[in-house]
Image (cartoon, grey):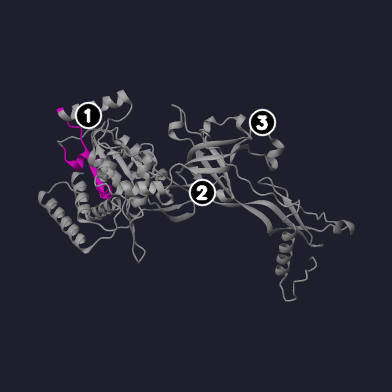
């Protein structure tokens, strides 16, 4: 044990003695030549063009490169030892060893002058309190779909995050990662059998998110002024909806519903802990060739963390959550699924489709696999597209027979649009002229207003989602009477309808989304009328 310093009293604990001695030592070594150098992070030039994962070659090793991709897996944050501290059980000397690899051989014999003079080999014990650790996280980065050549599978890259960069990304984020491309060093027994092949990783230096979540967006004064200018436009609702996939002709009500899906309603949390979802679920059911998939892909580009998948290529495990083995810690961990945009929803296996029933209403995922029993949050909207049971809608059959989805699943959709391809001379001429114009000019036909781009729509929605509109007693009575009339009408007509209490909740969510779109703090009767009109049109 080292001799105590002057300011240590007899009443101090041994731990207090060690802490005070280390404090004095750190102050004395702050400006010493042996002090650790400051950590430096490199930021790429503004003109740097991000590359895809497959563009990174062996010539990039040791260079600063920028890679664009989507985050598919994120490990837990783990402590990574940078400096290991030892203390001698005989002389009390502290030995520090710098760690440059994940695996190292610990020290056992004390190399201090005192032990060497007395010819006694003191044993060293590792002291985790005096050691220095770094926050470490491993991320898997995958190529974007537009970067993958035809007939190839997406490539992935391992990215190492340290210190302030950990927890900077989440699965589903599209990011530009700048870092140093390095080979993975061989450690332990692998170093004795090292060959010519080596794994590589990217040591991250700088991260830029391409599509931030709505809650993480910080608008500059110019963007904020643009948002408030748009809010004063009385035709904003129509202009924003027509700015969604302007290359696609028609579908005005469908585009309005998709706009409200992006805005969403406000989630409610009761005092007893029960939660009522605010996100909207929309299903597009229709004949082939009515641009359902194109609408889904456009929404996946506008949404901050939209993931596009197909029913045939999806399983219940891939849509909700799966138990995977973490490559860093070799532990069993939960990995999230896609669960936002599903094309060919009707072609999914029934067992896999039932896995998302809980997600669509409670917005939770209950998992009990491989010794892991937990409930995960799944705060996401679901936009699904499906074809009728017989390929095309057959008017000789009832809607229930045409729609190849169970009633328990249909009731969880707030809006279900039936898009039919009916021959109409005037409508077919306008559609053909629209399509030929797009092919001739590689752009959509001119509109009566300036079309809003995706970033402007995203900025406006991020500001709109901050609002939590309230429901007044007058509007509450109005929507109650409208719901009762709708139930009574369905009972009289005896049609194949799915009007249920969930229909009332869906109308409330749509009305909240309309109020949010106006940047209003209260729901008005006009918002309820538009919500009921969309539900009637669907």
User: Disc 3 versus disc 1: distance between alpha carbons?
Assistant: 59 Å
Q: Residue at x 21, y 61 (%)?
A: 476
> Label 3 near label 2: C-beta < 8 Å?
no
Q: Which disc, if any, is residue 431?
A: 1
Of label 2 and label 3, which has the lower sequence position? 2
Based on the picture, tell me whether residue 41 belongs to the magenta stretch: no
Q: Residue at x 74, y 65 (%)?
A: 21
The x, y position of residue 102, in whole percent, is: 65, 46
User: Magenta stretch?
Assistant: 397-425
Specify the quadrant of the image occupied by residue 345. Answer: top left
What residue occupies the far left of the structure in this picture?
A: 492
- Residue 354 seen in the current view: no
- Residue 324 seen in the current view: yes
For disc 3, the marked residue is: 196
From the viewer's perspective, tell me whether residue 198 is left or right of residue 253.
Answer: right
The x, y position of residue 355, in whole percent, is: 36, 48
For disc 2, the marked residue is: 168
What residue occupies the far top of the structure in this picture?
A: 440
Of label 1 and label 2, which has the lower sequence position? 2
């Amino acid at each position: 044990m080292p001799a105590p310093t002057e300011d240590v009293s007899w009443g101090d604990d041994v731990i207090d003695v060690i802490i005070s001695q280390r404090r004095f030592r750190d102050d004395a070594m702050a400006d010493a030549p042996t002090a650790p150098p400051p950590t430096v992070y490199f930021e790429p030039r503004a003109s740097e063009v991000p590359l895809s994962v497959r563009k990174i070659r062996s010539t990039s090793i040791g260079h600063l490169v920028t890679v664009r991709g989507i985050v598919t897996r994120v490990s837990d944050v783990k402590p990574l030892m940078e400096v290991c501290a030892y203390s001698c059980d005989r002389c009390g000397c502290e030995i520090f060893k710098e760690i440059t690899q994940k695996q190292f051989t610990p020290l056992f014999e004390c190399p201090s002058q005192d032990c060497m003079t007395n010819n006694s080999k003191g044993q060293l014990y590792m002291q985790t309190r005096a050691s220095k650790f770094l926050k470490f996280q491993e991320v898997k980065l995958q190529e974007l779909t537009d970067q993958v050549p035809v007939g190839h599978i997406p490539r992935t890259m391992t990215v190492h995050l340290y210190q302030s960069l950990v927890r900077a990304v989440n699965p589903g984020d599209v990011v530009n990662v700048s870092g140093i491309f390095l080979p993975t060093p061989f450690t332990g027994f692998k170093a004795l059998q090292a060959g010519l092949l080596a794994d590589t990783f990217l040591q991250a230096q700088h991260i830029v998110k391409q599509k931030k979540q709505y809650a993480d967006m910080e608008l500059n004064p110019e963007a904020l002024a643009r948002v408030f200018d748009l809010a004063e436009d009385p035709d904003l609702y129509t202009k924003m909806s027509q700015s969604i996939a302007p290359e696609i002709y028609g579908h005005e009500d469908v585009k309005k519903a998709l706009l409200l899906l992006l805005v969403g309603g406000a989630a409610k949390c009761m005092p007893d802990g029960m939660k009522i979802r605010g996100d909207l679920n929309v299903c597009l059911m229709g004949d082939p060739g009515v641009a359902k998939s194109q609408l889904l892909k456009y929404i996946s580009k506008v949404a901050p963390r939209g993931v596009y998948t197909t029913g045939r290529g999806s399983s219940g495990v891939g849509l909700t959550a799966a138990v995977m083995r973490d490559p860093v810690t070799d532990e069993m961990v939960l990995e999230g699924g896609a669960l936002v945009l599903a094309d060919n929803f009707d072609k999914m296996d029934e067992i896999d489709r039932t896995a998302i029933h809980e997600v669509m209403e409670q917005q939770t995922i209950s998992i009990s696999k491989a010794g892991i029993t937990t409930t995960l949050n799944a705060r996401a909207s679901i936009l699904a597209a499906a074809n009728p049971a017989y390929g095309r809608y057959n008017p000789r059959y009832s809607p229930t027979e045409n729609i190849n989805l169970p009633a328990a699943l249909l009731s969880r959709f707030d809006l279900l649009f039936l898009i039919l391809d009916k021959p109409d001379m005037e409508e077919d001429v306008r559609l053909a002229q629209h399509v030929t114009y797009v092919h001739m000019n590689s752009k959509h036909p001119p509109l009566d207003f300036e079309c809003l781009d995706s970033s402007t729509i995203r900025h406006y929605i991020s500001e709109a989602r901050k609002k939590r509109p309230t429901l007044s007693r007058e509007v509450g009575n109005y929507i109650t009477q409208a719901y009762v009339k709708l139930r009574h009408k369905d009972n009289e007509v005896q049609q194949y309808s799915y009007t249920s209490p969930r229909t009332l909740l869906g109308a409330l969510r749509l009305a909240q989304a309309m109020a949010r779109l106006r940047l209003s703090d209260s729901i008005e009767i006009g918002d309820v009328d538009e919500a009921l009109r969309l539900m009637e049109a669907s």
